Image (cartoon, rainbow, N blue to C red):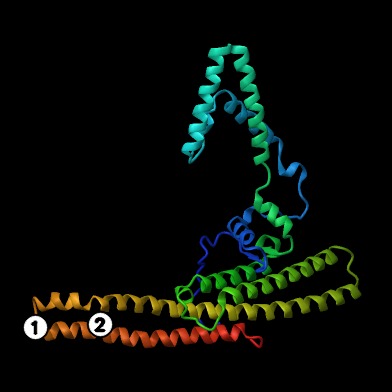
Amino acid sequence: MTGTSPIRGRSGDRRRQALVLDPDLPEAHRRAMAAHPEHLPPAPERPAWGGRTGGDVLAALALSALWGFLPLVPALARRGHRRALVAGAVLLQVAVLAVWIAYGFPVFFLACLAVQGIAAVALLAMAGESPVAGYGRRHHGRYVHASMLEPLDAALLDRTVAATDTVLNSPIDRDGLLDGIANRVALPRQAWEIAETLTELTRLRREQDNARSGRVTESISTVLASQEEALTVATRALARRISALEEYAWRTEEAEAVYAEWRTLQDLAEDGDAYRELLSRTVRDHLAAGEVGELTERARHLEESLRHSVEQARRAGLTLLTPEG
């Protein structure tokens, strides 16, 4: 990569580990999985009781008791409580008190126990794994999370995600300046191909580690050395591909900086009449015209620089995304 500027993480908090999803996944599932990667399961097997624990049971019993006897308390304690929820709790509270007044304490107590039972079942139904975990099990093998990889491969995945996000979240891509490059389609597919390769590299590295943990004869050592060399060559080749992706992202960042400056000057130039009128009140008209003319000329030169920067980014992208690249 020829640039020295680091690629900025545009997807938010870069402390969150990288995640790459198969572009062919259903869009709704992709969005949910990308928003909550921490809920993706480490294994395809569904846990017992849908992931519900003894703690979930105890919490459901405690909360259901409140819903049965004092429904206003959990409704008001709920963070970001909705008016409809509070209104329903008020009606329920009034109803159980009315039962007490009309039929006495024994009937009131039984009615509250019935409400508690219904609430306990509902709370247990909502406990356990999130829907994202269900998507993860359903689509196991069609996503790669950094936590699934060996450290070296995880670092390469993180670089891939950072570079891809830089381009896809760039204003010059959003505004169509990188025309001719279907970034929204091509880049996620590039990232997925890289992630699949990294998954295979991690699998082979772990196989090697397992083989080295046992009895290693001279013949086995020779084979392992040969395989390790093959892994090194493959890793270097993949790293070069990622570097090309980072080069594209860096060129895009450079063009974006020029684009931001150009747009600012364009906005200032559009206000030229207002500035001309302001200046003409205090200095000669030709001075006012000169000030605005200088601003327009700077915008023209910057536009030429923008065209050059965008063209450099497009060339880097086309080289990356063509079959020969």
Q: Looking at the picture, how far across and down is residue 18, in whole percent?
A: 61, 64
Height in image: 96 above or below 187? above
User: Where, by quadrant of the figure, is residue 230 drawn?
Assistant: bottom right
Placement of the N terminus among the 4 image quadrants: bottom right
* Quarter residue 42 falls in: bottom right
The amino acid on which the numbered mark 2 sits, given as a three-letter code, is: Leu
Q: Nearer the viewer, residue 279 or 184?
A: 184
- Kindly check if marks 1 and 2 are in contact, taking CB atoms under 8 A apart as contact: no
Label 2 residue SS: helix
- Residue occupying the far top of the picture: 104
How crowded pointer 1 is (Cα within 10 Å; few <14, some 14-19, many 20+) is rated as few
Residue 4 visible, this orientation: no
| Residue 236 shown left or right of residue 318 in the figure | right
For badge 1, the amino acid type reads Arg
Q: Secondary structure at mark 1?
A: loop
The residue at which mark 1 appears reads as 284
Q: Where is residue 315? Give x, y as percent.
A: 53, 87
Quadrant housing residue 55: top right
Q: Percent position (x, y) of residue 309?
A: 44, 85
The residue drawn where x is 45% and y is 79% is 254
Q: Residue at x 35, y 76 (%)?
A: 263
Tag shown at residue 295: 2
Mark nearer the N terminus (1 vs 2): 1
Q: Which mark is residue 195?
A: none
> Which residue is painted at 48% across and 41% down in the image?
80
Indicate whether 18 appears above or below 56.
Answer: below
> Residue 195 at x, y = what percent?
68, 70
Residue 87 visible, this orientation: yes
**Vertical arrangement, residue 86 with respect to residue 153, above or below:** above
Number of residue marks: 2
| Residue in the picture at 91% in, 75% down | 219
Could you give the CA–CA distance between mark 1 and mark 2, rounded to whole angstroms? 17 Å
